[in-house]
Image: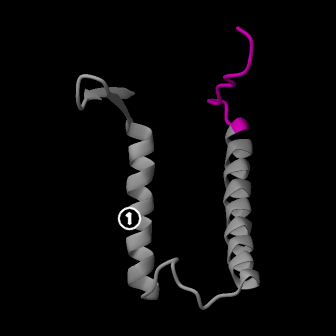
């Protein structure tokens, strides 16, 4: 949903609640990371290779989450209550 606010006579700024939600989540995640690791991403004690390794591990975790959700979807398709939203009516 777009919210339009006028800051002056010449400029209308539109605010996207979804984008704002993601921004808020990034900020909260940043704060949690700072609290947990006592540092920020501005740190310079890691090499390029180490940063890439962190990224690889995070992406590997993401693929595991995707696989888990795909498994749940496949299981739900076996249910007599499953509604195939792609089917023609």
Q: Is residue 13 left or right of residue 51?
A: left
- Magenta part of the protein: which range? 77-89
State the image coordinates of residue 28 (x, y, percent, origin top left): 38, 65
| Crowd class of label 1 (few under 14; some 14 to 19; many from 20; radius 10 Å) | few
Q: Is residue 12 left or right of residue 52?
A: left
State the image coordinates of residue 22 (x, y, percent, origin top left): 45, 50
Image quadrant where one finds the N terminus: top left
State the image coordinates of residue 63 (x, y, percent, origin top left): 73, 60
Residue 72 to residue 17: above or below = below
Q: Is residue 36 left or right of residue 77?
A: left
**Which residue is found at the position 58% from the left and 87% from the top?**
44
Among all residues in the image, which is located at the extreme top? 89
- The picture quadrant where one finds residue 82 is top right
Residue 58 to residue 71: above or below = below
Image quadrant where one finds the C terminus: top right
**Which residue is found at the position 42% from the left and 57% from the top?**
25
Q: Which residue is more in the foreground, 78 or 31?
A: 31
**Residue behind mark 1:** 28
Principal secondary structure, stretch drawn in magenta: loop
């Amino acid at each position: 949903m777009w919210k339009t606010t006028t800051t002056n006579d010449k400029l209308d700024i539109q605010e996207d609640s979804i984008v704002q939600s993601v921004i808020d989540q990034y900020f909260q995640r940043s704060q949690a990371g700072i609290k947990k690791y006592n540092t920020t991403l501005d740190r310079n004690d890691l090499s390029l290779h180490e940063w890439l390794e962190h990224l690889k591990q995070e992406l590997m975790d993401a693929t595991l989450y995707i696989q888990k959700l795909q498994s749940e979807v496949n299981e739900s398709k076996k249910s007599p209550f499953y509604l195939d939203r792609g089917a023609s009516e």
